[in-house]
Structures are given as C-alpha cells and as structure tokens.
Image (spheres, rainbow, N blue to C red):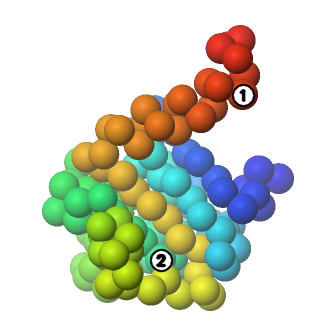
Amino acid sequence: TCLKADVVVFATTAPSPYVLEPVFQPGQLVLNISLRDLGPEIIAQANNILEDVEHCLKAQTSPDLAVQQYQHRSFITRTLAQLMTGQVELSPDKASIFSPFGLGVLDLAVGQRVYRPGGGRG
C-alpha cells in the first residue's frame, strides 16, 4: 500500500486524526503537511522533526494531541534547523515524521514537485 512507500505525504483537510494505528516502518519518512492526520500513538513512536516546536504544539495538530495525551514532549526529536545543522541524529529504528507548521514554503515546494511531472494535467 501507499503507507509502505519510502516517503508518505499527508496533505488533507482532515480536522482530526484518522490514521490511529502505528503503520510506518523504521527509516520511513512521513511528511505531515496537513498536521492532523496522525493519532498520538503514531507520533509518540516516531522521530519527530518540527519546523517550530511552540508553533506546532497548538491548534490540535497531531503533535499537540500527542503532548496532551502523554503529558510530555520527549518524543519530539528537534527542529528542522537542528537536523539540518547536524545537532540531532534520528533513530534508525523509527519512522521519521516532519510536521512543517509555520513553513508554508514547503507546501509550495511539494505542490510544485507534484505539479511538474503531471504537466499541469490535474
């Protein structure tokens, strides 16, 4: 299934999590662009890279719901900037989830990458 791909992108308008059971594999990259698709248990069992931690931990996002449920933030690995500058290493035994709340340019970049191969055919 698509959930077994090396990279999985969630870009929906879901108001609350609907992927509730851990389905991701170690080493898999999950782009949590829509921010509300994944249940707290999935978030708690993964490497979590956030664009802006405080910004992402509000508005009932998947990481916010996980913090509310578990009452800690230890499953938040670090920020994208810290990952890119080598300040953090990801556990190879977990899937990695990137939640880009506050990084609209990523939405545009992903949209452009999807649009190009399709030639704008819809």
Residue 104, how many percent across, how many down?
32, 38
Q: Which residue is mark 1?
A: 117
In front: 27, or 85? 85
Q: Which residue is mark 2?
A: 47
Q: Residue furthest top?
A: 121
In front: 93, or 69? 93
Apparent side of residue 15 relative to residue 7 in the rendered image (left or right): left
Write down the quadrant of residue 25 in the picture.
bottom right
Residue 119, how many percent across, how many down?
70, 17
Task: Tell me which residue sits at (27%, 79%) in the image.
Answer: 73
Q: If the image is split into quadrants, where does the C terminus sit?
A: top right
**Element under disc 1:** helix
Q: Residue furthest right?
A: 1
In front: 97, or 62? 97
User: Along the polypeptide, which appears first: circle 2 or circle 1?
Assistant: 2
Apparent side of residue 107 relative to residue 101 in the rendered image (left or right): right
Where 112 falls versus 59 (above or below)? above
Where 58 falls versus 72 (above or below)? above
Task: Tell me which residue sits at (46%, 69%) in the image.
Answer: 43
Write down the quadrant of residue 44 in the picture.
bottom left
Apparent side of residue 37 relative to residue 60 in the rendered image (left or right): right
Residue 85, how many percent across, how many down?
33, 75
Q: CA distance from mark 2 to mark 1?
A: 30 Å
Camera sees residue 70: no
Task: Give the label, 2 or 1, closer to the camera.
Answer: 1
Task: Tell me which residue sits at (53%, 87%) in the image.
Answer: 91
Task: Tell me which residue sits at (53%, 71%) in the image.
Answer: 96
Residue 42, how many percent across, how many down?
53, 69
As shown in the figure, which amino acid type bears the numbered disc 2? Asn
**Element under disc 2:** strand
As shown in the figure, which amino acid type bears the numbered disc 1? Pro
Dot 2, how many residues are within 10 Å of its Cα: few (below 14), some (14-19), or many (20+)?
many
